[in-house]
Image (spheres, rainbow, N blue to C red):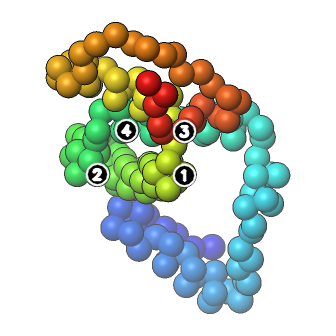
Amino acid sequence: MFQTTSAQARDGSLLTALQAEIAKRGIALEQKSYAAIVKALEPVVIKHYHKLIAVCIKHIRASHLALDMLLERAKSLHDRTRAREFAEAIWKITQTYSRKLEVANRIDFDSMIANATRLVETGQYSGSIRFWAGFRGNGGAMDAKSSR
């Protein structure tokens, strides 16, 4: 038996301490594949986290939040360390999602609505709407070009 503390979790030394204690006991660590981890989880758990991540991405992108804004908000929460780590992780996921959309020259539905709203609110768009963009069964993303 060995002991760990919440202070180790806060200062980032917990994983190193766990690895050292496990190695000292001669226990081999085996990294699980993504498929093995997903197989062990209940589908409802996966669905819950997919939804949570999707909502976070939506809010970050729609509000044009930056990492420093997320980290500042994390400081005001009870579990600052966990909040900071979540903010950093969700930021990386959001950046990757945004990059993939950009590389594919695509836009998601929420960004399309947010961009249109911003253009109207700032007076950069004035005129009639000439078309309605529909989905083509591609997960809510569409080509980032208009057909005026």
Residue type for callout 2: Leu
Q: Eyeballing the image, is 95 above or below 24? A: above
- Identify residue for label 4: 61
User: Is residue 107 rendered to the left or right of residue 45?
Assistant: left
Q: Nearer the viewer, residue 19 or 83?
A: 83
Foreground mark, 3 or 4, reads: 3
Q: Earlier in the sequence, mark 3 or mark 1?
A: 1
Residue type for callout 3: Asp
The reply to whether dot 4 and dot 1 touch (C-beta < 8 Å) is no
Rounded to the nearest angstrom, the CA distance separating label 3 from label 4 is 18 Å
Rounded to the nearest angstrom, the CA distance separating label 4 from label 1 is 17 Å
The answer to whether residue 93 is seen in the rendering is: no
Q: Earlier in the sequence, mark 3 or mark 4?
A: 4
Occupied quadrant, residue 6: bottom left
Residue type for callout 1: Ala
Residue at 20% from the left image edge and 25% from the top image edge: 124
Rounded to the nearest angstrom, the CA distance separating label 1 from label 2 is 24 Å
Q: Earlier in the sequence, mark 1 or mark 2?
A: 2
Give residue 104's mark: 1
Residue type for callout 4: Arg
Rounded to the nearest angstrom, the CA distance separating label 4 from label 2 is 11 Å
- Identify residue for label 2: 67
User: Is residue 121 rendered to the left or right of residue 104?
Assistant: left
Query: Which SS class for mark 3?
Result: strand
Q: Earlier in the sequence, mark 2 or mark 3?
A: 2
User: Is residue 27 rendered to the left or right of residue 113?
Assistant: right
Residue 117 in picture, x, y percent from top left:
31, 20
